[in-house]
Amino acid sequence: DVKVTQSSRYLVKRTGEKVFLECVQDMDHENMFWYRQDPGLGLRLIYFSYDVKMKEKGDIPEGYSVSREKKERFSLILESASTNQTSMYLCASRDTSHEQYFGPGTRLTVT
Amino acid sequence: QKEVEQNSGPLSVPEGAIASLNCTYSDRGSQSFFWYRQYSGKSPELIMFIYSNGDKEDGRFTAQLNKASQYVSLLIRDSQPSDSATYLCASYSGNTGKLIFGQGTTLQVKP
């Protein structure tokens, strides 16, 4: 079974803090994704990566950056957390047949 | 126009009935289609995928694809209260290399 893990299920941070969300997959997938999900807005793609050290902006990259130094790990960074970044963050990894698997999610609250 | 459209619901069916969830997409270049189930507070779980026109069955689930009409559906037979969740439809676009998600349909199965 594909396994995608995220470093935290719940996280509370203060405004202005730098926040790191970690994602690890164990299936040697090349493609990895970060989404946020908010009520009424659905899933929105923040960033994605097709390979190590490669990254592409998604639909809402502002205020975020990413890092992919190893194939299995994709990190999302909030440079200076703001209250409007309070959300559920979902990491996903995808195989060559386009089947995409999600991690359990991190519910981030910025106060 | 949204690229993948779903009726938000809620769709309410009695236990034991067939639940029919529908999805339309606008990109004729879409190659493959996916159904995810998402329980409240949890991450999306891949339950079905379909690439070819016609029906694909997996247990109580049947996915149907009609590329000419740009229409995908998910049928759940013998619906159970445990099927109550939000169902997300997604299409894979070879043009963008991304999955495009609908907003989801909430299904309620009443005992």
Image: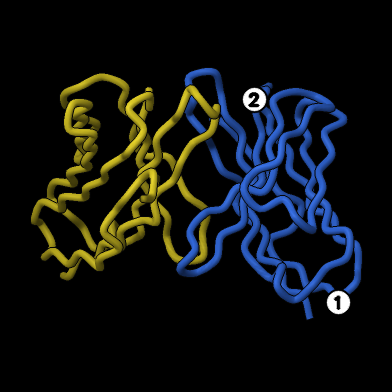
Chain colours: A blue, B yellow
> Which circle's residue, 1 or 2, is located before the other in the chain?
1
- Quadrant for the C terminus of chain B in the image: bottom left
At horizontal 69% and vertical 34% (from top left) the residue drawn is: A25
Which amino acid, mark 1?
Answer: Arg
Tell me: B65 left or right of A81: left
| Number of the label disc, if any, that sits on residue A27 | 2
Q: Position of residue A59 (x, y in %)?
A: 62, 48
- The residue beneath circle 1 is A14
Q: Quadrant of residue A27?
A: top right
At horizontal 22% and vertical 42% (from top left) the residue drawn is: B74
Q: Quadrant of residue B55?
A: top left
Determine the secondary structure under disc 1. loop
Q: Nearer the viewer, mark 1 or mark 2?
A: 1
- The chain carrying label 2 is A
Q: Position of residue A68 (x, y in %)?
A: 82, 33
Vertical order, B74 against B79 (above or below): above
Vertical order, B50 against A89 (above or below): above
Vertical order, A27 against B9 (above or below): above
Q: Position of residue A77 (x, y in %)?
A: 83, 52
